[in-house]
Image (cartoon, helix red, strand yellow):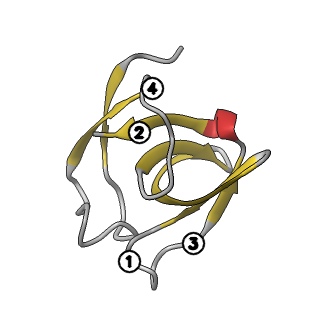
Amino acid sequence: MLRPLFIRRVEGHSMAPTLKPGQIIIASSLLSVAVGKVVVAHHEGIEIVKRVTSIEPGWIELVGDNVSPSHNARVSPTSVIGVVL
């Protein structure tokens, strides 16, 4: 069930320096996904926090701000569960 606002804790270094490991974030399922926004999405059985770099029909490209420890992800639009505030 999607909630209008939800809280998550950042794990890993893929979004540093924007988001640090252990940092608490608030996300909303009511906001629109757009290029440049940071989102929470389901990918390969886990939730990830990444930045949207491209939106194409049928998929959204996500990357971490810290390129070296980050892995790109291509997810369906329905996999995005919220936009970080």
Disc 4 marks a residue whose amino acid type is Ser
Q: Nearer the viewer, mark 2 or mark 3?
A: 2
Q: Which residue is disc 2 drawn over? A: 83
Q: Secondary structure at mark 3?
A: loop
Work out how far the residue at label 1 is from the one at label 4, CA to CA, in angstroms: 25 Å
Q: Which residue is disc 1 drawn over? A: 66
Q: Nearer the viewer, residue 42 or 75?
A: 75
Numbered tag placed on residue 76 in the rendering: none
Q: In x, y percent, where is residue 29?
A: 45, 26
The residue drawn where x is 25% and y is 65% is: 18
Q: For the residue carrying disc 2, how many other residues have a C-alpha within 10 Å: few (<14), some (14-19), or many (20+)?
A: many
Circle nearer the N terminus (1, 4): 4
Q: Which residue is disc 3 drawn over? A: 71
Image-based side of 61 in relation to 23, left or right: right
> Is 84 rendered above or below residue 7?
below
The residue drawn where x is 46% and y is 43% is: 40
Work out how far the residue at label 3 is from the one at label 4, CA to CA, in angstroms: 24 Å
> Is 29 rendered above or below residue 9?
above
Q: Secondary structure at mark 1?
A: loop
Q: In x, y percent, where is residue 79?
A: 64, 38
Q: Which residue is disc 4 drawn over? A: 29
Q: In x, y percent, where is residue 72?
A: 60, 69
Rendered-image quadrant of the C terminus: top left
